[in-house]
Image (cartoon, rainbow, N blue to C red):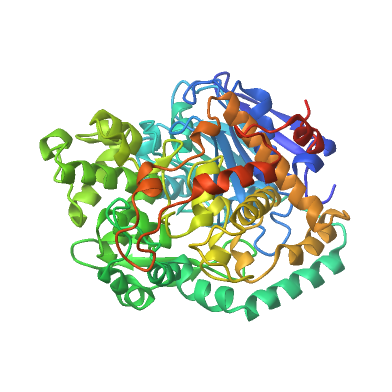
Amino acid sequence: MYGWLGRCLRVNLSKGAFAIEEISRELMERFVGGRGLGIKMLSDEIAPGTDPLSPENRIIFVSGPLVGTGAVTGASCNVVTKSALSGTAACAKLRGHFGAELKYSGFDMIIVEGKAESPVILSILDDKIAIQPALEYWGRTTSETENLFKKSLGDPWAARETYLLTIGPAGEKQVPLANVINDGFLSVGGAGIGAVMGSKNLKAVAVKGNHSVTVADGSRFVQVVTTLINKLNGAPLTSQSMSSWGSAFFVGLCHEKGILPFKNFQSSSIEEARRIGTEALAEAFALRSRGCFACPIACIKKTNVQDPRFQGKGMAPTYLAIGALGLNCGITDLTAIGMANMICAEMGLDPIAAGGTVATAMELIQRGVATNEDLKADLRFGHAEDLLQALTLMATKKGHAKRMGQGAKALAHEFGNPQVFMGVKAIPMAPFDPRAIQGMGLHYATSNYGPHHLYAYTFIDEVLSAHESCDPRSTEGKPELVKRYQDTTAVMDCLGLCNWPLMGLKFNNMVPMVNSCLGTGYKAEDLLQMGERIWNLERLFNMQAGITGEHDTLPERFLREPLPDGPAKGQTSRVEEMLPDYYRLRGWDSQGRPLADTLKALQLGE
């Protein structure tokens, strides 16, 4: 086989045993790999009603067929499980080098089941598979764990080639907001996955290997990859904006369009936002670029925070961090936002879920329905020191964390104000106000993994106008746009490709790379149908877990309260208008249930 290895490592932590299994070609061709293969295995192996923190839940680490081949941005690996926060299927997107090294270790996929009696690390190092004790790592931050494990190898060269996926104290304590960290960087999406790893006493997975991944037509593959790299190097968004600033360059654009949220989405546009754009970022941090495996964009920005109040080393703040941990908490101090982002990485907290929970607590205090004494903290909008303290305590279940660590929805309900929770399917919203960007609002309402923008990049056209000029405040054509980007993102996650190149390339441009790698004759529509198949399979899993069309909506604030200020002043989300057309395009009934003919056409009839 080309691209695929056809091998799965199954690990039963309860028995302390593992086995190597073959993955059929039919299964890989039908569900591709990555996210698609992960949700297929999850659907087959657990009942949708399974308790996410029970030994019966599975956690699946799976790379796509293009990962490790040298395909442009072919580095993406997915972690699939049932979320401890939302109860839906969950998928974390891993960047860096872990996915490629997983392939080089000899496996497309690892399936972990059961629960170890005490903390363990799963290591796959040069064909030596071990479930080793990890008591000495338990309680440590993610960077401490990675550094100590690599030091234990006793070989600096082996350590450089070994890549880890870890949980922090938040995952160990099974905090529902916990996520996983790989290569020292926060994964994208997947809130609640860290808690599932913690429930299994699995502290980390380490991979290193020397297996090769072959492609079908090497000369054609190299030619296509070279062409795509040249295209990316000639596109301003990928060669300049992303390469210089990472996703933080969105801040200025979203501010101009009134999309940036402020104080738990109570308003959108503030003068202070002008002070946290790219120029301020360069002044606050010494930025150093780091690229993922086979990526020419190098959008990850590393830095040292030297501010005497906040000092640390790690990732510079992304758009997500600036929006979710900064402006949505009323905070405009970039160094504090950068430190908050680093704390999330060290503690293993999802930054969107954590930031949304803190913002919810701040509004509850603002409204007078919760007090500082209730939460054992002075959480007021704009107070950066309180944010940093709250993040640390939430990850360790100390003080007010026993309440806040359960998430924004639970906190809002506890204090009798459920309308203060700004999220969907129990997950707080990524920092795009859906009143000002209609397509994103429809995606948030219908996304299988909660309201995260990186499962449908509608902002590529709604904000950046990369391929077509698209008014973010208009609903015209948005159901089609949302479906297309949802399907595109799904299939790219399956293949193992990052979605950022879509700022400089069209999806059609990538099809020759897929075919020359896998030896296939796919057309773009064939691949997009695979993405549609994955989207529908995720939908079926969630429906059986009790997440139905009734959950395809947004908080009342976005539907009934017009934006009070900014360029989109007076706008509300019109998701209710767009939903029927979206369902029709999906081949679903009026309740959001896939029709029998749709499932049959997508080879999901069974």
Nearer to me, 601 or 475: 475
Instruction: Give x and y (percent) for residue 21.
Output: 75, 30
Nearer to me, 380 or 71: 380
Q: How many marks?
A: 0
- Which residue lies at the image location 31% right of the left edge and 77% below the top edge? 283
- Which residue lies at the image location 65% right of the left edge and 74% below the top edge? 232
Considering every residue shown, the one lying at the far left of the view is 373
Instruction: Give x and y (percent) for residue 201.
Output: 45, 28
Quarter of the figure with residue 395:
top left
Instruction: Give x and y (percent) for residue 196.
Output: 47, 31
Quarter of the figure with residue 432:
bottom left
Nearer to me, 434 or 123: 434
Is residue 164 at least partly visible in the picture? no
Q: Is residue 196 left or right of residue 231?
A: left
Quarter of the figure with residue 424:
top left
Instruction: Give x and y (percent) for residue 100.
Output: 65, 53
Nearer to me, 535 or 318: 535
Is residue 554 at least partly visible in the picture? yes
Q: Is residue 287 left or right of residue 218?
A: left
Which quadrant is the C terminus positioned in? Answer: top right
